[in-house]
Image (cartoon, rainbow, N blue to C red):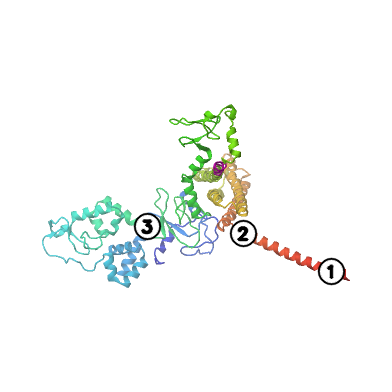
Amino acid sequence: MDSEEDMLDAHDVYSGEDDFYSDDYKDSDDDDDDGEPDYGFVEEDADDSAMIASHRSQKNFCVLKEEDILKHQMDAIERVSVVLSITEVEASVLLRYYHWSVGKVHDEWFADEERVRKTVGILERPVVPPSDDTELTCGICFDPFPPEKIASVSCGHPFCTTCWTGYISTTINDGPGCLMLRCPDPSCLAAVGHDMVDKFVSEEDKDKYNRYFLRSYIEDNRKMKWCPAPGCEYAIDFVAGSGNYDVSCLCSFSFCWNCTEEAHRPVDCSTVSKWILKNSAESENMNWILANSKPCPRCKRPIEKNQGCMHMTCTPPCKYEFCWLCLGAWMDHGERTGGFYACNRYEVAKQEGQYDETERRREMAKNSLERYTHYYERWASNQTSRQKAMTDLQQLQTHNLEKLSDKQCTPESQLKFILEAWLQIIECRRVLKWTYAYGYYLPDHEHAKRQFFEYLQGEAESGLERLHQCVEKDLLQFLNADGPSKDFNDFRTKLAGLTSVTKNYFENLVKALENGLADVDSHAACSSKSTSSKSTGCSSKTRGKGKGSSRTGGS
């Protein structure tokens, strides 16, 4: 298990969470001075690329740049070197072996130093003692060389500089395994450190080795991952415990820490995996073929009828002519069977039940396809709208914000409410998109849950559309105005209000879905209990009145 002291200072670099809906703020390092949650609103001089990542941030992860990773590597190497009184080269070998866990290195070293040295390849004494000979023989090419042309690691096995260069370069070009390089002698386990790499290989190979060395810090640590966005070289250091796995990189890409797919809160990773597989699988193609085509009676190839009469002719080389409805040979058809647009044989056979199973399967496939298309179109539509909103936000930041500031005589710092609205739209489009995947897998028999889900989804979507229209269209009149408008303050109030209302709608939607729509079950239980209680009460009252009536009747 990794030590808690490992890389704690990594959390003070960049921190942010694409999380609009959680009040559970947890700092990865020190708490805020004033005790208030840090929402991470963007400063005026912040990079545009970090806008989405830092909006209303929750510090359960931090983003590391390359220089940050290198700094933490060097800090870890220095700590191990000082505590264990070994060279930095030996410290880096130890850390690589123990996956950059400083605590693990310390524990293992002080438990059994000799065993660790032998296992890792850091030898205290050379296997081959130093020689005073004027010539030494290389262990690879077996040529004699003067001592200055011979080099060795801690084991003392002598190899010439040319062989060292070839050996190390070949291993580097074979991949990251070069980080665990050992002495060329087959029987020796002495480690070859980066000092030998720096001494013998070309600059190109040094760069490759250093790149592997840098990446190992992230890839060997289960608390860190590279951002999966294409071309991004940032890493994420994640602090578990908040229950929310959605993180945002400085490149503006949001992803799920757990499955590394695109951020999909409030939908769980299992649902996302099934949805992505369904979108890419051949099953929908087969459903479409089954729902919209019939097999040729002779060659069995699927044929689609998109217009015209019931007389079908299969494509060459088959060229079989048949009736679309009953699939019988067309030569047996004519006016007596209903002509070109009907088939009496089919109607009779259908009444006798001959086509029930086939039609039922085709109808089921058609309904399944229509249902999938309904959810997929809305899923894809919200994705497109989100991408468009991100483009519009970028346009606002680079051009329109300054223009609006000049025309309305308002400092840019007082126009952040527009940025807030766009960021809310981008986040809400992402959430709304994944609710359609959630809805697709919601069981049909759970009618109460489906109704509650569709109500919450509808309310959230309506609020989002109002907000999107306001910031997209109503803003244009102020951008195109010749000068300051007296209605701008009203627009500010309206947009801020819509942003707040939309956020509340989506808070309710997210919480409900993350709870598995449990409110429906609890409400149903309460209703059942209440009904039962009322029923019991009514029975008691009825029995009481009955007794009273009896007594009255008897008197």
Mark 1: amino acid: Ser
The residues bearing labels 2 and 3 have C-alpha atoms spaced at a distance of 43 Å
- Label 1 element class: helix
Question: Which image quadrant is residue 446 in?
Answer: bottom right
- Give the residue at mark 1: 550
Q: Is residue 4 above or below residue 502?
A: below
- Give the residue at mark 2: 521
Asked whether residue 44 is in view, the answer is no
Mark 3: amino acid: Glu
Looking at the image, which residue sits at the far left? 134
| Residue in the image at 39% along x and 63% along y | 7
- Label 2 element class: helix
Location of residue 65 in the rendering, given as x and y in whole percent from the top left corner:
40, 54
- Give the residue at mark 3: 219
Quadrant of the snapshot with the C terminus: bottom right
Location of residue 319 in the rendering, given as x and y in whole percent from the top left corner:
46, 30
| Residue in the image at 81% along x and 69% along y | 547
Magenta span of residues: 356-364
